C-alpha cells in the first residue's frame, strides 16, 4: 500500500506520507449528510475519537491504495478475514470461520456469518462479495481500480481486467452464505491477501451510483459515514448500531484532515485532538511528558506515545525509464551517497531503522535480504559516477542535475533536503519539487518524475506484498518501471510454493537479485511517532498503520 503515509496504491507510500501517515479522527459527530438508507438508525451517542488525517486519495475500497484512505476503509468495511498480529495469522471477520481449501490448493470456500447488513440495510451476502471483488477488475467503472492486481491469482481476473469478460470465472456463489474462490494456480499467501480492506463486499448502489459511493461509501463495518467526505476538511464516522459484531465502544471517529501534521500536534496540545503525529525532533520530549506505550502499539493513560516498528519501507523510487537513471551504476551511486544513519539519528532521534533492503525487519530479517548498495560510501559512489560518464570538474560538480519529487506539507521536507545535501557532496545537483499528495501519486503512476519520494506499507504482512506490487513488470504500483522477465517468472513461481519456509527462501533470492539493480533506493524502516490524549483509555495502532477503532475506549 502506498504510503502517503501502511502506507505506504495502499500505492507506494508507507500507507500517505511517513511522518504524516497518520490515521485519525476527532471532533463532534453529526448525523446529517447523504442518503444511507432508511433501515438504519445512526447513533450519535458516546464519545468521539478525534484523529489527524492527511487528505486521502480515495475512501472507496475499490481504490484502497494508500494508508490514509485505507485507514478510513478499514473502519467502514469488513472483508472476509483480517490479520491478527498477536497470532501472526489471518482470522475470520465477515466469514464465520476460515475457509476450506481443496486438495489441489485452488479453491477456497468461505461461509459467511448470518444476519450481516450494510449501512443502508441491504443484506451482506455472497453476491455482495462477488460484486466487491469484481469491481477491482472492472475496467469500465467511472473510477477503475488501481489495486486490482491483488486478485491476479483468481481465475478470470485477467479476462475481466482486459474487458474480455463481464465477470470473474473464479468467483461463485453456491448460495447466499457461501462464497467460492478458485485460483489459476496455488498461492501460499492467498489467505493473507484476503485480509486486504479492498476485498470487501459492496451493496448494489456501489454500481448504480458510483459518484455518490466515492464520496460516501456504504460499508458493512463497525462505523458508517454520517455525511459525505468533506475534502481537505474532515471525514465524519459514527457507530453503526446494526453491526453484526461487538459494538464499538466509541460513538464515532472524526478524521480531521489537515495539510500540515505539525498543526495536528498543536491541536493535540490544546486538547482538541486524541491521536496525532509527533513533530520531528520532539519524540523523546513527548515520551518524557506523556510516557511510552509498553508494546509500542497500544496507548493507555500515562503510556501514550507509540513507537512500535512499522511494516513499511520508506524509499526513493527511481524512474528506470529515464535516460540518465536507466544506468544501474547511477542508481547505485545515488544510493551509496545517501547517509541514512544521519537521517535516522538527526531527524528521528534514532527511533527509526536504516533500511538495508526493501523488506522491513518485521516482515523478514534474513542476511540474504541485504542490498549491497544500501550503505553509506560516498567514495564508491563517486567512482561509480565516474564509470557512468559523469566525471567531476575542478569544483566537484558533475554536470548531472536530477529532480527529486515529493508530496509537500506532509513531513518529508527535511528528509528530502538531507538527501539533496548528500548528493551535492558527490557532485549531483538536486532540484526539489513539492506537490500535493494526489498530484504526486498521479505523477508516480504515470512515470512523470525522475526521483520520487515513496514507500510501501504492507497491504498484508508477507514478503510477496513488498516484491510483487513494486517490481512485477505489470503491477500498477511498479512506479520505477522496473521490467525484468526473469524476475516476473521467479515471482510467479514463488507464489505457488506451498511450504512456507521454501517460499520465504525463494523470495529472499528474488529480493537479493532486485537489490543488485537498485530500481528503488530504500532509506529507512519507520516506527510509530504518535501520541494519544489522556482521555484515551485504550487505542491500538498496528504495524500496518491500521487503527483498531472498534475496540478503542475513551474515558
Image (cartoon, rainbow, N blue to C red):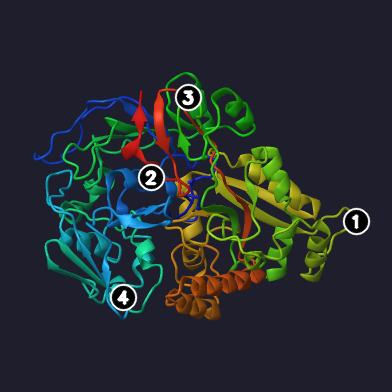
Residue identified by numbered label 1: 394
Give the image location of residue 143, x and y in percent. 30, 56
Q: Quadrant of the C terminus?
A: top left
Is the residue under label 4 in contact with that under label 2 (CB below 8 Å)? Answer: no
Nearer to me, 538 or 210: 538
Which residue does the image show at 19% across and 30% down from the upper left? 43
Q: Earlier in the sequence, mark 4 or mark 1?
A: 4
Residue 271 in picture, x, y percent from top left = 44, 19
| Quadrant location of the N terminus in the rendered image | bottom left
Check the image and report above or below for 259 versus 543. above
Q: Nearer the viewer, residue 268 or 210?
A: 268
Point out the tag, 3 or 1, that comes first from the N-terminus.
Answer: 3
- Cβ–Cβ under 8 Å for marks 2 and 3: no
Does label 2 or label 4 sit earlier along the sequence?
A: 2
Q: CA distance from mark 3 to mark 1?
A: 52 Å
- The residue at the far front in this view is 87
SS at mark 1 in the image: loop
Q: Residues within 10 Å of mark 3 (few under 14, many from 20)?
A: many
Q: Residues within 10 Å of mark 2 (few under 14, many from 20)?
A: many
Disc 2 marks which residue?
71
Mark 2 or 4, which is nearer the eye?
4
Q: Nearer the viewer, residue 218 or 176?
A: 176
| Disc ID at residue 183 | 4
Q: Which residue is mark 3?
A: 268
Give me the residue at 80% from left, 57% from top: 378
| First reached walking from the N terminus: tag 2 or tag 3 | 2
Amino acid at each position: 500500500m502506498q504510503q502517503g503515509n501502511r502506507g505506504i496504491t495502499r500505492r507506494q507510500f508507507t500507507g500517505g506520507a511517513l511522518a504524516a501517515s497518520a490515521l485519525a479522527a476527532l471532533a463532534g459527530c453529526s448525523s446529517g449528510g447523504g442518503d444511507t438508507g432508511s433501515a438504519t438508525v445512526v447513533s450519535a451517542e458516546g464519545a468521539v475519537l478525534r484523529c489527524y488525517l492527511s487528505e486521502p486519495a480515495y475512501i472507496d475500497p475499490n481504490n484502497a491504495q494508500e494508508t490514509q484512505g485505507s485507514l478510513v476503509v478499514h473502519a467502514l468495511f469488513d472483508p472476509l478475514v483480517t490479520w491478527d498480529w498477536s497470532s501472526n495469522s489471518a482470522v475470520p471477520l465477515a466469514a464465520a470461520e476460515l475457509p476450506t481449501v481443496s486438495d489441489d490448493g485452488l479453491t477456497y470456500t468461505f461461509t459467511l456469518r448470518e444476519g450481516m447488513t450494510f449501512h443502508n440495510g441491504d443484506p451482506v451476502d455472497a453476491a455482495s462479495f462477488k460484486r466487491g471483488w469484481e469491481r477491482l477488475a472492472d475496467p469500465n467503472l467511472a473510477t477503475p481500480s488501481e489495486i486490482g492486481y491483488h486478485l491476479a491469482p483468481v481465475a478470470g481476473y485477467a479476462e475481466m481486467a482486459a474487458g474480455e469478460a463481464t465477470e470473474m470465472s473464479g468467483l461463485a456463489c453456491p448460495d447466499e452464505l457461501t462464497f467460492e474462490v478458485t485460483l489459476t494456480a496455488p498461492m501460499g499467501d492467498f489467505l493473507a491477501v484476503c485480509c486486504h480492506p479492498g476485498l470487501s463486499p459492496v451493496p448494489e448502489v456501489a454500481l448504480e451510483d458510483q459518484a455518490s459511493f466515492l464520496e460516501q461509501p456504504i460499508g458493512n463495518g463497525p462505523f458508517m459515514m454520517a455525511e459525505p467526505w468533506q475534502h481537505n476538511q474532515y471525514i465524519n464516522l459514527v457507530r453503526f448500531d446494526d453491526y453484526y459484531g461487538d459494538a464499538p465502544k466509541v460513538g464515532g471517529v472524526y478524521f480531521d484532515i489537515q495539510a500540515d501534521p505539525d498543526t495536528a500536534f498543536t491541536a493535540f496540545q490544546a486538547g482538541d485532538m486524541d491521536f496525532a503525529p509527533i513533530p520531528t525532533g520532539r519524540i523523546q520530549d513527548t515520551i518524557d511528558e506523556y510516557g511510552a506505550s509498553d508494546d509500542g502499539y497500544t496507548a493507555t493513560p500515562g503510556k501514550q506515545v507509540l513507537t512500535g516498528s512499522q511494516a513499511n519501507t520508506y524509499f526513493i523510487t527511481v524512474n528506470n525509464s529515464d535516460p540518465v537513471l536507466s544506468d544501474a551504476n547511477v542508481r547505485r551511486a545515488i544510493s551509496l551517497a545517501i547517509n541514512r544513519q544521519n537521517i535516522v539519528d538527526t531527524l528521528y532521534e534514532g527511533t527509526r531503522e536504516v533500511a538495508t533492503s526493501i523488506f522491513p525487519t518485521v516482515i523478514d530479517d534474513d542476511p540474504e535480504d541485504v542490498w549491497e548498495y544500501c550503505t553509506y560510501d560516498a567514495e564508491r559512489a563517486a567512482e561509480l559516477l565516474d564509470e557512468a560518464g559523469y566525471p567531476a570538474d575542478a569544483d566537484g560538480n558533475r554536470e548531472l542535475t536530477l529532480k527529486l519529487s515529493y508530496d509537500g506539507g506532509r513531513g518529508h521536507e527535511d528528509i528530502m533536503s538531507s538527501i539533496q545535501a548528500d548528493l551535492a557532496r558527490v557532485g549531483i545537483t538536486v532540484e526539489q519539487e513539492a506537490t500535493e499528495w494526489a498530484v504526486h501519486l498521479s505523477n508516480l503512476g504515470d512515470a512523470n518524475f525522475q526521483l520520487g519520494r515513496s514507500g510501501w506499507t504492507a497491504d498484508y504482512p508477507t514478503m510477496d506484498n513488498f516484491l510483487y506490487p513494486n517490481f512485477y513488470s505489470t503491477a500498477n504500483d511498479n512506479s520505477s518501471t522496473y521490467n525484468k522477465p526473469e524476475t516476473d517468472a521467479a515471482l510467479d513461481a514463488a507464489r505457488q510454493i506451498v511450504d512456507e519456509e521454501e517460499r520465504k527462501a525463494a523470495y529472499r533470492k528474488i529480493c537479493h537479485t532486485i537489490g543488485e539493480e537498485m530500481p528503488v533506493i530504500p532509506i529507512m524502516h519507520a516506527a510509530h511517532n504518535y501520541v494519544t490524549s489522556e482521555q484515551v483509555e485504550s487505542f491500538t495502532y498496528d504495524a500496518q498503520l491500521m487503527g483498531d477503532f472498534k475496540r478503542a475506549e475513551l474515558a
